[in-house]
Amino acid sequence: MDYEAFFAGHLRRLHDEGRYRVFAELERIAGAFPRARLHREGEAPRDVTVWCSNDYLAMGQHPAVIEAMQAAIGAQGSGAGGTRNISGTNTLHAALERELAQLHEKDAALVFTSGYVANETTLQTLGAMLPGCELYSDSFNHASMIAGIRHSGAVRRIFRHNDVGHLEELLAAADPAAPKIVAFESVYSMDGDVSPIGEICRVAHRHGALTYLDEVHAVGMYGARGAGVAERDGVLAEVDIVQGTLAKAFGVVGGYIAASAATIDFVRSCGAGFIFTTSLPPAIAAAALASVRHVSAHPELRVRHQERAATLKRRLSAAGLPVMPSVTHIVPVSVDDAALCKQASDLLLDRHSIYVQPINYPTVPRGTERLRLTPTPLHSDEDMTRLVSALKDVWQTLGLQGGLGRRAAAE
Ligand SMILES: *Cc1c(COP(=O)(O)O)cnc(C)c1O
């Protein structure tokens, strides 16, 4: 096998399809969000406005978070010193887990090195160890849940996205005695739609299934205390296992689950992705803890965030741009072609110093390529004015004028 030729051939196909991934190299500037400095080979660094960050509330640069992290580094140093089992459990991990359990009104919580690892480890562990387990998975579920479900070796059944009737049909046809888990998300991150959590949980429980909810794109941003859409909808207790990230609205890094005491103890005791890896640095836990406390205590952040998103959607629509029908803070604009999507992103950056990463297959289905905008409380009216006029220019340049994206036509 000519390995080099194989790799090069695959990469050439990605280039040809316009979906070769080019990373924008950014230098973040604490206190200047959403501005960052773009570094490119052969060019002087320049400031750009970031419109695609998952640091949804700009907590990654919040003074309370920075101070907590700096203080913990000064007091405890850099690394945790081990896995959780062997000298790597810190008082700050324990405090963070108590805080997260409280946030979600569960007995206990468990912190992982990332949200990806939390999903993969939990679903893999439960699916493999519950005898004869069947996993019911929403067709739009994130890659990390799919990985956990696949690796568990459990029977996998996929229900159509947000289709409670289809889920019920699948559950009704199953062996009533088999243990089951229904895994889904609250906010779907590429379309910005929301699942009917209460209904899905009612159907799942009627058929004796556990419910597993990924609230990665909702924690910090929905509900009175920022516990997510389950809190907003008044169904926290219906969710058996909630999973979240410390990396998006909380602006740090790490992932977690919160559930009953026995569930958490079980995953703690049996989850390979929890056991066999060094725990997060104490300073990360300190920063995450400060962020969760701050965000939870400041509902006005959530109000401002929603207002910014609504304003941006309104202004894009008014400008005739094909904004997709999101009901959340995620604002996708249809392009529906991989090469054009990449070109639109390049033009925004080169001509307008606006950074929006193109979203192509396999993150979204082919033919539904898009620009995914994430307004934060720190994006100003003036930022929006410049974004809308830049998008209009790009749409005109590429012949996308009139907003004739497929999704827009269906809207
Ligand atoms: C980002 C993401 C994850 C993974 O979270 P990380 O903390 O970034 O690893 C899990 N689920 C969904 C839906 C995500 O978008």
Image: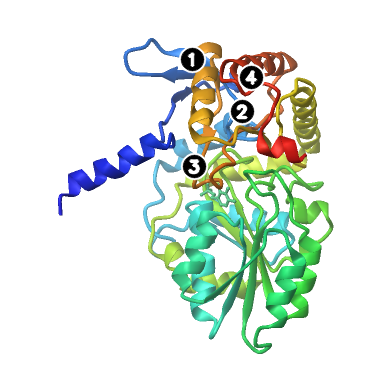
Label disc, if present, on residue 283 of the rendered structure = 3
**Is 146 rendered above or below residue 334?**
below
Inspect the image, locate mark 3, and give the three-letter code of the amino acid beneath it: Ala
User: Mark 4: few, some, or many residues within 10 Å (few <14, many ≥20)?
Assistant: many
Looking at the image, which residue is at 35% across and 41% down?
A: 13
Inspect the image, locate mark 4, and give the three-letter code of the amino acid beneath it: Leu
Q: Earlier in the sequence, mark 2 or mark 3?
A: 2
**Which residue position holds label 2?**
63
Q: CA distance from mark 4 to mark 2?
A: 33 Å
Looking at the rendering, which quadrant does residue 19 occupy?
top left
Q: Would you say 181 lies left or right of 304 here? A: left
Q: Quadrant of the N terminus?
A: bottom left
Q: Position of residue 161 (x, y in %)?
A: 68, 58
- For the residue pair 90 and 209, the one nearer the viewer reads as 209
Q: Secondary structure at mark 2?
A: helix
Farthest-out residue, right:
234
Looking at the image, which residue is at 23% across and 47% down?
A: 6
Q: CA distance from mark 2 to mark 3?
A: 14 Å
Looking at the image, which residue is at 83% across and 55% down?
A: 233
Q: Secondary structure at mark 3?
A: helix
User: Mark 1: few, some, or many residues within 10 Å (few <14, many ≥20)?
Assistant: few
Q: Earlier in the sequence, mark 3 or mark 4?
A: 3
Q: Would you say 118 lies left or right of 380 here? A: left
Q: Quadrant of the C terminus?
A: top right
